[in-house]
Amino acid sequence: MYKYMKLSSESRMSKKVLFLLKRREDYHAIVHAEVGLSTGLYNSAKFMHDMLEENKIASVLEVAIDNNCIDRLVTKHQPTHVIIEALWVVPTKFAVLCKLHPNVKWIIRLHSEMPFMAGEGMAMDWIGDYSGFKNLIIGVNAPRMMRETAMYLQHRNSWTDEQTAEKVIYLPNFYPQEYKPYNKIDKKSDTIDIGCFGAIRPLKNHLLQAFAAIDFANQIGKKLRFHVNAGRIEMQGQPAINNLKGLFEQISGHGHQLINHQWRPREQFLELCAEMDIGMQCNFSETFNIVSADLISQGVPIVGTADEIPWAVPAFCADPNDSVDIVKTLKTTYSAPWINVKSNQWNLTRYTNQTAKIWTKYFS
């Protein structure tokens, strides 16, 4: 059961939300029947969908093949609001969709901070074009990105502050409050398992985190098993995985290992998280970081980045540019892992309680 304030059912039943995601380009019905939907974006939308339903706000989640599926899905479900998760609908499509469905509110929900968005070559053009449609709103899941997007669109469209507040809204991430107790580290073992999960791409900072993890393992006298998801290489991430492989091959004589895991369904991934001693997410750009939440939910302590993971406890966060600081924070976490887990779970609960209030208020 979710732990947040619920609103009266009378005020909630008039709205219906349709979440729309785009199916992956390499989708294959047999290969991707389960794994193909187990991505951060899908999980994020699913958490929102479940939370709204728990609060008696009608919600549907669909995965579309492409732009041409949208009219059919909207006609099928008759929503009052359609949330397009991330940038995949070409702006010109809304010239048709807004006429076909004049009473629908369309929300393009952005999931990235501006440094990450810089890697999406069409982002500024598309966001600017979206803003020209009357019934289309930009939803943003991070305060900094919201401020920057609002500034850009207010300047582009000569909006008043009131118009900007209506057209650019804050819709942060939710995460189910289902936690396991601290998963005790076996300090007698001669190995330590550190999970640095997530798609391989430059702003995830895998290589420096690997260096810090190796240094940390050496200092506590253990062999490192450094776990990554090598199944998804994105946004010029191939050099990053190549360098990770090269690093561990070059020092293989010291017993440290790089362990690659293929992408897997959510429940299986949570089982993998539970096998870790520590999780690392000292990343350069984040808006929420579901991987950290997955690790913490399984009772595994994390070392993150305070300015990027909004709910992470600063005492257990490190400078993502400084391997010495990361090692120091790994040592702090290793010394007090249960405090790391409990305090991060508490912070995550507080953050998601606020998220639930924001979403239920908006859609009521």
Image: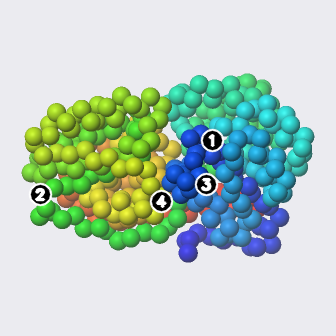
Image depth: mark 4 or mark 1 in front: 4
Image disc number at residue 190: 2
Which kind of residue does numbered mark 3 sit on?
Ala
**Percent of width and height locating residue 309:** 44, 47
The CA span between labels 3 and 2 is 40 Å
Image depth: mark 4 or mark 3 in front: 4
Which kind of residue does numbered mark 1 sit on?
Ala
Mark 2: secondary structure: loop
Question: Pointers 2 and 4 in contact (CB under 8 A)?
Answer: no
Image disc number at residue 17: none
Which of these two is toward me, 270 or 233? 233
Mark 3 closeness class: few <14, some 14–19, many ≥20 residues within 10 Å:
many
Which kind of residue does numbered mark 2 sit on?
Asp
Of the 4 image quadrants, the one containing the C terminus is bottom right
The CA span between labels 3 and 1 is 10 Å
Which kind of residue does numbered mark 4 sit on?
Arg
Q: Of callouts 2 and 4, which one flags the residue occurring earlier in the amino acid sequence?
A: 2
User: Is residue 336 toward the left or the right of residue 7 in the image?
Assistant: left
Mark 2 closeness class: few <14, some 14–19, many ≥20 residues within 10 Å:
few
Residue that numbered label 3 is attached to = 45
The CA span between labels 1 and 2 is 43 Å
Image disc number at residue 86: 1
Is any part of residue 24 visible from this angle? yes
Mark 1: secondary structure: loop
Residue that numbered label 4 is attached to = 266
Which of these two is toward me, 85 or 63? 63
Q: Of callouts 3 and 1, which one flags the residue occurring earlier in the amino acid sequence?
A: 3
Q: Of callouts 4 and 1, which one flags the residue occurring earlier in the amino acid sequence?
A: 1
Q: Is residue 175 above or below residue 171?
A: below
